[in-house]
Image: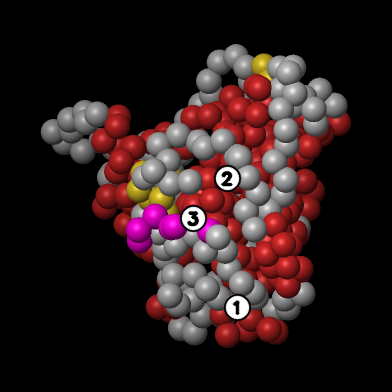
Amino acid sequence: MHPPETPAIIATVPSGPEWEFGGHPYGLEPLALPAQWLPRTVAVDPPWIERLCLRLAQVSAASVRDLRPDGAEEIDRLFWFRWITAHQTTFLMWQMLGAILHQGEAGHADDDQLAARARALVCGYSLMLMYGSSAPRVIYGPVIRMPMARQHVNLTGAWARDYSPVRPLIRGKVTLGSGAAAEALRRECEVNEEVHEGIAEKVLSEGEVSLLQSPKPKFRRQIPRDTLMWLYDGIFLTSRAAVSHHDVAGQLARRLHAIFLDVTANDLYPSFAPSAHEEPHRLRTPEVMRRKAALTDCLLEILSFVGAPVIQAHPTTTVQASSPMRELRIT
C-alpha cells in the first residue's frame, strides 16, 4: 500500500505511455519538496517502474503525434511547460544528488554504483538546461524571459534552495569514489559547466544580458535571502512541505514521463519552432551532441533509479569536499 499523498500534490507513478500530467497536454503540476534533501530509504514500486520503462522504450513519434501542438498559443504553452517543468525536474534531481552525496559521505561498498547514478543525474541536469531553454529567441523573450522579469527584475538561480548540496560536486570540489565511474562523473560535471555557459549564449540576443546583470531598479531595497528563495520557489510552482521520499520519487517519475513523451513527439528542438541554429559552439561539441541524441535514454535511466535497490552503507568515507561554487544564472 502506498503512503497517502501530500494534499494537492500528485505523486502517483504513471501507468503507461499516455499523457497523465497536469490534466491536459502541457499543463502544469505543483511540486512539493522538503526544506532539505531526504535520505533514500526504499525503492518505489520496482515492478511498476520496470514495466513503465519497458513500455516507454517502445513509444514511437507516430504513437504520440497527438501531443504535437496546434497553433501559436499551444506552441507557447509547450515552451512554458518546458521551462517550468525542466526547473522542477532539476530541483528533484538535485534532491536525489544530495542524497547520493550523503550516502558517499557515510561510506558505501559500491562507490562506483553511486558515482554512476550521480553521473546520470548530472547528465539529466545538463539536458534539462537545454530542454527548458529550447524555445527560439523569438518565443523565449516574450513567453519566458518577460514573465520572469515581472516576478523580479533581477531574478537569479542563486536563489534556488536545492542547489546548495550539489554545488561542490558540479564545481569539482567533491569526489565520489576513485575509479572509472568517479572519473566519468567528474567529466560529466565539466560538460555541465559548458552547457550552462552555452545556454546563456543561446537564449540571449546580441547585446542582451541576464536578468541578474540587468539594471537595478530605482529605490531598490534589499530583502531577506529566505524571502528570495520563497519567491524563486513560487515562480516554479514549488512549495516546501513534510513530504516523504515516496512523494519526491513519484513527482520525479511523473515529470520524466511527461518530458519523455514530449521529446518523443516533438524532439528537443521542434521543427515547428526551430532553434538549433541559435546554438553556440559550446552546445555543438561532440560530447554535448551525444548527450542530446541520448536524451530519452538518460530519462529512462534516471526513471529506473526510482525503482532501483538502495545501496547499503559501508564503514569507509569516500567523499571529500572543499569550498563552495559559483551561483546559477537565470537569463
Q: State the residue in front, 127 or 91.
A: 91
Q: Nearer the viewer, mark 3 or mark 1?
A: 3
Residue that label 1 marks: 18
Q: State the residue in front, 265 or 182.
A: 182
Going by the numbered disc 2, the residue's amino acid type is Met
Q: Kindly report the distance in space between the C-alpha atoms of the residues bearing marks 3 and 2.
A: 22 Å
Q: Residue 7: say if magenta.
A: yes
Going by the numbered disc 1, the residue's amino acid type is Glu
Q: Start and end of the magenta stretch?
A: 2-8
Q: Secondary structure at mark 2?
A: helix
Q: Kindly report the distance in space between the C-alpha atoms of the residues bearing marks 1 and 2.
A: 23 Å
The residue depicted at 79 percent of the width and 48 percent of the height is 286
**Depicted 113 relative to depicted 264: above or below:** above
Name the N-terminal-most of marks 1 and 2.
1
Q: Residue 246: say if magenta.
A: no
Magenta segment main secondary structure: loop
Q: State the residue in front, 163 or 223.
A: 163
Q: Kindly report the distance in space between the C-alpha atoms of the residues bearing marks 3 and 1.
A: 24 Å
Residue that label 3 marks: 3
